[in-house]
Image (cartoon, rainbow, N blue to C red):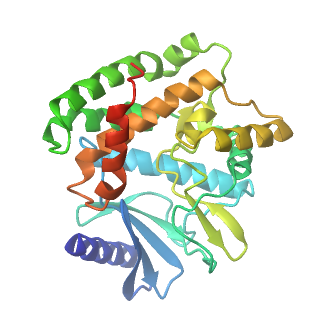
Amino acid sequence: MTERSRRAAEAALDAGRALGLAATKPTVLHDAFSVVVQLEPTPVVARVQVVLPPGMTPHAQAQRQQRELDAVTWLDRQGVPVVAPAPMVPRVPVRRGGFGMTFWELADVAADHEPYAAVPMAHTATLHAALAGYPDELPFLTPFNRSLAGLIDSLDDAPELLPGDISRARDEYAALRSVLSDRAAFEARFPGVSVQTIHGDGPALNVIRTTDGVRFSDFEDVTCGPVEWDLALAGPTAVAEYDDAARELGLRTTNSEVQRLVDAAAMLMTIGCVTLIPQLPVLAEGILPMVESWRESPSPA
């Protein structure tokens, strides 16, 4: 991982210079699924994706990154607090040294910021109110229908899983796909439940606390879907908190059956992420205990 991070940082520096930035030094700010690099002394941060689901081609990755850049640019123009794309370079993904990357403004991080520390669910409701007006049509539940598909296909290569785990995971995936495979299938099963543009990956966790307040970040999985997807595995208390905020904003409150369904899908994505442990070993600390919990739970399929 250290060598990969070094190569990613150097690729970001080379890409930034090629775009005209007066950058002289790459400083790694965060290293997990992406290596986040400030291109010093400029106020530009490169996010270099280093851990990708199996089967993610460079073309598919670039499409995913462009959807993020477009959505966040639109949100920024609406006055929504986001970490915006860097205005000093074109708002398009770049490929350099075998890595796909995007460029963002340097956030003025507050002293109390902690990565992945959740903010109140009222923030998510406010984000959903803004995203409901997003004018571009997005594919339906791309985290489930594109990322998870590759993870499920790779389960045989995960030594942490038993044969029974793999069989169960594939059965659950098939059952969930009957409802979540596309918008038409979902709306046929839940005709009264609206869908809209959503963050796609737990917006209450993907925030940066800055000196001027909370800013949303990491819209890599921005997609169309039910708002419940953004609350997956958050728990009943958080869902109730979201519903209170949604009522105040005049938004739809959550549907308990949809929430149960997307919770099952999110848990299955967690199981699928076992296949990513060789790329990011630290994942084992959080995922393997959840595998044990999943084994002991009844199958929703």
Report whether 277 appears left or right of 76.
left
Vertical relation: 278 (above or below) 10: above
Residue at image position (34%, 48%) is 289
Q: List x then y, in percent, for residue 106.
A: 55, 75
Q: List x then y, in percent, for residue 276.
A: 26, 50
Farthest residue toward the front? 296
Q: List x then y, in percent, for residue 281.
A: 25, 60
Q: Where on the picture, by quarter, is residue 171?
A: top left
Report whether 280 appears left or right of 252.
left
Residue at image position (55%, 69%) is 86
Report whether 6 appears left or right of 202.
left
Residue situated in front as seen by the camera: 289 or 119? 289
Residue at image position (71%, 52%) is 123
Residue at image position (43%, 80%) is 39
Quarter holding the C terminus? Answer: top left
Q: Where on the picture, by quarter, is residue 252?
A: top right
Query: Is residue 21 visible to us here?
Result: no
